[in-house]
Image (spheres, helix red, strand yellow):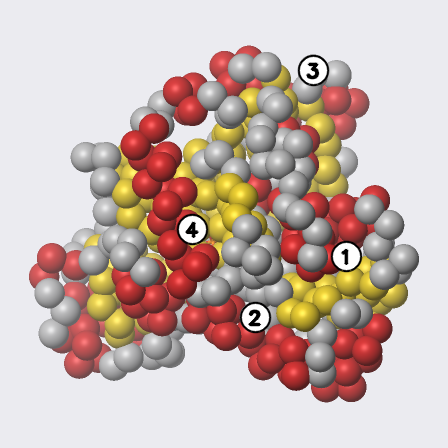
């Protein structure tokens, strides 16, 4: 089979390997970690740093198409591989923009999509002149933040100074704290000839800054989202992808405000946690789309055949009340109809670490939610 290259060895890379291998491709994974989830299932594991030029050269020589699975991949590594003649999706240029919240927000606005009121913060002077309307707000580091890390809620200008110092005065954005009615996300894929497919938006609930629950349904009314809002989210995602000349799978996270207005929060240049349900609930998964884009195949059907509730499994779950390591009761979970267990093969459970997820599918969202509540009860999930 033909080789596909993956920079990054996390769970998104692992699920990509599964989709690619099922379709007859071989996958080469570049990741320095000997125990990486994707490296363990790859056909070839290049153990080297993400910016190691000889490893990148080897990846490019082996693989006519290369992608990535983590947001903070060095953009120059993607450019380097592109220069060696492999097709890289997404491009280093697209990834570079969304890796920096300052550039990302400006870019989203330029694409005609609204974001929360914000200012770039590169110095204390920027905080000094920040409009009062940005408080209470959130100060977020411009680069390398994820899962709510590198952000602080700030009630006042003084707290914003303190947080800025705490972040060692790296570039940040200060954005107003918005009254969120809910959070939704649109996962989409764009191919080489501007062909686009969109999954129906998922409704997301976060716990301590990390995605906890994501619900989706082929029937939009079950999610309580109006058609106008769905169209708006989809058009916004499409506009952003086209402006970036994006190739591959991406996710746009949105805030729905109390009044119903839609704001884009951020763009993930890869398959997304809120798209995991597409494995069990949709005709083609987000990972299969990633394969199809790379291989120049027609994109797959994004239609959901089931309603679904996805529950993230964090490392905390592996420790009992006494703080001792204990494998969760999978047989009990799997006795619940429609429950699909996904574990990422990570040996060391740590609090907050994404170890796996469960997708519960059913013919209606009401049913899926009911069954997911059973799973939550069994596992004692705090969300
Ligand atoms: P991710 O893991 O999704 O990449 P992240 O660390 O990049 O997370 P954000 O997505 O910017 O961070 O924020 C995390 C969560 O914090 C959001 O999903 C939302 O719940 C909340 N949040 C962020 N910005 C705002 C805001 N301006 N107003 C209200 N809530 C916000
Ligand atoms: Mg993010
Ligand atoms: Mg986010």
Judge left or right: residue 290 versus residue 263. Answer: right
Within-10-Å neighbours for mark 2: few <14, some 14–19, many 20+: many
Q: Secondary structure at mark 4?
A: helix
Q: Please tell me whether mark 3 sits on a helix, a strand or a loop.
A: loop
* Vertical relation: 174 (above or below) 379: below
Residue picked out by circle 4: 238
Q: Which mark is residue 38?
A: 1
Camera-nearest label, 4 or 1? 4
Q: Earlier in the sequence, mark 4 or mark 1?
A: 1
CA–CA distance between discs 2 and 3? 41 Å
> Which quadrant of the figure has residue 123?
bottom left
- Name the residue at 76% across, 27% down: 330
**The CB of the residue at mark 4 lies under 8 Å from ligand 3:** no
| Structural distance between the alpha carbons of marks 2 and 4 | 17 Å
Residue 101 placed where, x, y %?
Answer: 37, 67
Residue in the image at 50% along x and 74% along y: 93
Residue 348 in view: no
Q: In the rendered image, which quarter contains the N terminus? A: bottom right
For label 4, the crowd category at 10 Å Cα-Cα, with few meaning under 14, some 14 to 19 and many 20 or more, is: many
Q: Residues within 10 Å of mark 3 (few under 14, many from 20)?
A: few
Q: Which mark is residue 337?
A: 3
Give the number of the mark in front: 1 or 2: 2
Which x, y percent locates residue 168?
37, 78
């Amino acid at each position: 089979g033909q080789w596909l290259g993956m920079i990054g060895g996390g769970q998104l890379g692992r699920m990509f390997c599964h989709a690619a291998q099922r379709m007859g491709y071989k996958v080469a994974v570049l990741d320095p970690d000997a125990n990486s989830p994707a490296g363990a299932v790859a056909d070839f594991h290049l153990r080297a740093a993400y910016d190691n030029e000889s490893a990148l050269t080897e990846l490019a020589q082996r693989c006519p198409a290369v992608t990535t699975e983590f947001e903070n991949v060095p953009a120059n590594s993607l450019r380097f591989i592109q220069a060696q003649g492999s097709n890289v999706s997404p491009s280093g240029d697209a990834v570079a923009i969304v890796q920096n919240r300052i550039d990302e927000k400006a870019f989203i606005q330029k694409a005609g999509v609204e974001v929360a009121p914000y200012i770039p913060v590169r110095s204390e002077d920027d905080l000094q002149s920040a409009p009062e309307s940005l408080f209470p707000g959130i100060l977020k580091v411009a680069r390398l933040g994820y899962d709510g890390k590198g952000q602080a809620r700030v009630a006042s200008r003084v707290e914003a100074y303190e947080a800025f110092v705490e972040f060692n005065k790296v570039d940040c954005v200060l954005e107003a704290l918005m009254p969120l009615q809910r959070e939704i996300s649109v996962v989409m894929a764009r191919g080489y000839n501007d062909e686009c497919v969109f999954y129906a938006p998922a409704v997301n609930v976060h716990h301590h800054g990390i995605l906890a629950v994501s619900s989706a349904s082929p029937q939009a009314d079950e999610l309580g989202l109006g058609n106008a809002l769905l169209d708006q989210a989809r058009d916004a995602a499409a506009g952003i992808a086209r402006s970036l000349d994006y190739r591959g799978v991406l996710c746009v996270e949105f805030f729905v405000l109390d009044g119903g207005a839609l704001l884009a929060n951020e763009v993930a240049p890869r398959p997304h946690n809120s798209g995991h349900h597409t494995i069990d609930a949709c005709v083609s998964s987000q990972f299969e789309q990633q394969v199809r884009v790379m291989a120049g195949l027609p994109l797959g059907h994004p239609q959901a055949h089931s309603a679904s509730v996805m529950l993230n499994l964090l490392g905390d779950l592996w420790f009992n009340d006494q703080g001792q390591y204990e494998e969760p009761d999978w047989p009990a979970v799997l006795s619940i109809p429609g429950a699909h267990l996904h574990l990422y093969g990570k040996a060391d459970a740590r609090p907050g670490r994404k170890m796996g997820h469960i997708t519960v599918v059913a013919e209606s969202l009401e049913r899926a939610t009911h069954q997911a509540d059973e799973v939550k009860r069994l596992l004692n999930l705090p969300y």
